[in-house]
Image (tube, grey):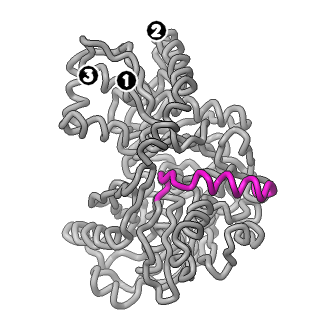
Amino acid sequence: MFLGLDLGTSGLKGVVISGAGDVLAQASCSLTVQSPKATWSEQSPEEWWLALVDVCQQLRNVCDFSAIEALGFSGQMHGATLLNRAGEVLRPCILWNDGRSKSQCESLMRRYPELLTLSGNLVMPGFTAPKIAWVKEHEPDIFAQLAKVLLPKDYMVFRMTGAFATDCSDAAGTLWLNPETRMWDEQLLAMCDLTVAHMPRVFEGHEIVGHVSKSVAVALGLGEIPVVAGAGDNAAGAVGMGVTEPGQGFVSLGTSGVYFSVSQVHNANPENTVHAFCHALPNRWHQMGVTLSAANSLTWFANTVNMTVPDLMDELERSGVTKTRVVFLPYLNGERTPINDPFASGQFFGVMNNTTRAEMCLAVLEGVAFSMLDCQSALSSAGSDVSELSLIGGGARSAIWRQIMANVLNKTLIYRDGGDVGPGLGAARLALLGKREREGGAIEALIKDHCTLPSVLASHAPDTALQDYYRSKYQIYGALYKQTSLMSEMLAEIVA
């Protein structure tokens, strides 16, 4: 058996698979996010560890942990976890959806125009590099103690093994990795007054980086088993869904939303706010468009109206509402693709006295779908052609939302078994690959055998009768942001 642990923003999930790749058990533990100031988003790494202990306890109740051969992590990308020389955490982790470093982004781009060529990506507040620039400027005492910068999942690997390690897919999201060479770039690091010594060693996602330490093994009920480098959540989700070859892609409806496309070379296109990163598997790359608040938008609305998400979706289904004049901008944490604006704000437009809660819920689902259409357009302009599109993430469990996505994107979408645990499944698959390669297997043959497409649970073709409706609303959606973007920035300054 193999264990995959997925450190997300809203929770940590564990997935156990058999040697044949079948999912045997799942467990999860919720996490919280702190926002001490507007546009800030932080988490305590210690909370991650406590969640891991909880998830392992749940899985140990239903699985024989002594039979687990190896484990892998997937995790939320870009987070800045800062350690001193003793390996102690210096401050809460600054997360991927934190927008405080806008001025540092502008400064880096102005001072180092070569950054785009070296990294292949536009500097955005979500990435790790500008976060470190912010810490240096606003928390110099913390920066002076800085010995290691780790991404969230890599901190968990460190706690498990004592090793400082990362993988190409996650490291590419820092802006310090050269995606073509798949190694740290000293020139990029120097722009933030860092060196390679501040960084963990870079591995391919399936490569073994260490073993569970004796003390951790005893505490969790595991053996001193191999731990692989793992992957950023989206690359891990791709591995879990068998999205490993050019032409394949997926849409993820997790806390954030992602439109992911595999490429056989590093195909940078920063002008269109497209992320061009390494895949978690050797000799593969990918492009992404990212919206910062996908399923999070639905969770926020449910909390606001004091309902659960399942009850809210049941109400929408019972209402029979399929159209609404309400438009929703899902910019609750600012936005990346295509506008790269940390001050963009969420809003409802078109609300009337007779507007129902079901209509507002429908508008939220549509708004997130429109943000994914923005991502699809950006990828298309960057030359990315996805012929096979799967749906993953917790939001993909909703048949209503899947159909809206198909309608808005005007593509047939496939929902596959395991789509709700894609990153955790991918992490477990990477652990399996690493163990089998160590035993003498050839990695490309192993990928072909084990990174297969899961079985289809549902297929959603676009409803052509609604195309005019969605086309007209999408135009209003785009115009609404353009008309209100300046006011959103003014509001952020008033309450800063």
Q: What distance separates the C-alpha of mark 3 from that of mark 1? A: 9 Å
Residue 176 found in image quarter: bottom right
* Residue under label 3: 358
Q: Nearer the viewer, residue 92 or 74?
A: 92
Q: Nearer the viewer, residue 397 or 485?
A: 485
Q: What distance separates the C-alpha of mark 3 from that of mark 2? A: 21 Å
- The region drawn magenta spans 95-115
Name which residue lies at 62% across and 79% down: 198
Which three-letter amino acid code belongs to the residue tagged 2? Ala
Residue 373 locus on image (x, y percent) = 55, 29
Q: Is residue 463 above or below residue 285?
A: above
* Residue under label 1: 363
Name which residue lies at 60% across and 37% down: 339
Which three-letter amino acid code belongs to the residue tagged 1? Ala
Disc marking residue 262: none
Query: Residue extending furthest front?
Result: 494
Residue 182 locus on image (x, y percent) = 71, 65
- The secondary structure type at the circle numbered 2 is helix
